[in-house]
Amino acid sequence: MLNQSPSDTLDRLVGLLPQSQTYATRHEREKVVLATQGSEDGLFDPSLPGLSVEERLCVALYACLLTPSPDLAAEYESRLQKLGANLQTILLIQKSDIQSIGNARLAAMLNFTRTLITKPINADKLALSALPEAGLSTPEVVTLAQLISFVSYQVRLAAGLRAMKALELSS
Amino acid sequence: MSTPIHIHGFTNDTLGWKAWLDVVQLAQATPAQMSVLEESHPKAKESDYYLFLVHQPEILRQRSLAFNAIMYAPGGLSRAERELASTVVSRINGCVYCASVHAQRFEQLAKRQDVIEQVFEQPNGAGTSDRERAIVDFSIELTLNPEHVNADSVKKLIDAGLQNSEVLDLIHSVAIFAWANRLMLNLGEPIFPSA
């Protein structure tokens, strides 16, 4: 594991080592690797004003559970635990029992997450307007929409890379 | 020349898009916001989409870097095939706006629109060759069931003649439209040309 880049989430989660063909193929598109990690770093940057890091991680966890993407869900759950997040909230998200969270702002964000992840076509003006009604500013809405959409991208990238690695190992 | 397509609400017409919430006014944009707009797209300053996303300039900057590297980098999967994958994902997700833009780009690059008509009609099984059908099938599977994608899914692409580097470009093109479609579908709506 010595040569593995620890700062790249997808290399780490998919288990891509520099000597592997899939790693080499992925890193021929280094700009994509860097902008993917750069997007994640930007979206979870503690200095980004607006949504708290805990709120952002809750949204990412829920997005991964709904997709489903068990590996990325475990990753975001472990980041929530390291942050000392409310364990009851994590449990309720895992049970998809958003109503019982008892936090209207977080519930609005998680309901929006469910629409975007499971039925993006069902999104409409009404679904979006629930966010300002729950107190989110427009820049916060942008962060939230980018975050959910980024996770949709990240889980598919992880799934694709994992499949490439599996074929490499089988041949 | 491109012939107008109108199938199941999807089209290759040129559409507009308007945001449902307030966009950043250029006169009030910060220098950081202006520079991200300039990096993102030649027409970003006239586009509600970019003017809305630039409320968070650093996030937009990274997204545009990823998008442009995936869709426009030389080598690997042909640009027409990347556009085909983007159109399939947009059709599956129901993003009429994205589908129109990328259908047009496919037509410009490939000089034909037969497969676009097939994708709009019925994406499952669309494609004018084994290679195209493999690209379309994989795009649908990774969009709808990412957890089901496995070695066998990739093997079908290799058997249809794709190199590893082309498979990666295809994965990127599908994944980036999971991202783009969700923004376009959830933050505003397409504007259709008046009849």
Image (cartoon, rainbow, N blue to C red):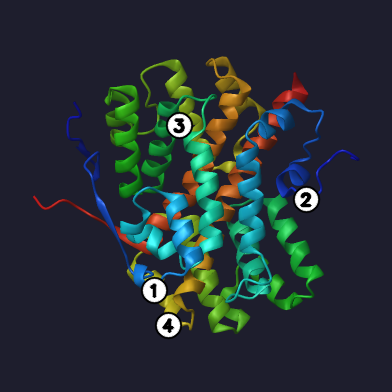
- Quarter of the image with the N terminus of chain A is top right
Left or right of B24: which side holds B12? Answer: left
Residue A149 in sight here: no
- Quarter of the image with the C terminus of chain A is top right
Which residue carries the number 2 mark?
A: A7
Using the image, determine if residue A164 lies above or below residue A159: above
Chain bearing mark 3:
B
Q: Which mark is residue A133?
A: 4
Q: Amino acid at mark 1?
A: Gln
- Give the secondary structure at mark 2: loop
Q: Position of residue A85 (x, y in %)?
A: 75, 75
Chain bearing mark 4:
A
Which residue carries the number 1 mark?
A: B28
Decide: marks 2, 1 in contact (CB < 8 A)? Answer: no
- Give the secondary structure at mark 3: helix
Q: Residue furthest left?
A: B195
In the image, which is nearer the foreground, mark 3 or mark 1?
Answer: 1
Chain bearing mark 2:
A
How far apart marks 2 and 3 lie (CA) works out to: 28 Å
Is circle 4 on the same chain as circle 2? yes
Q: Amino acid at mark 4?
A: Glu
In the image, which is nearer the foreground, mark 4 or mark 2?
Answer: 2
How far apart marks 3 and 1 lie (CA) works out to: 36 Å
Which residue carries the number 3 mark?
A: B82
How far apart marks 2 and 1 lie (CA) works out to: 36 Å
Decide: marks 3, 4 in contact (CB < 8 A)? Answer: no
Residue at image x 61%, y 25%? B165
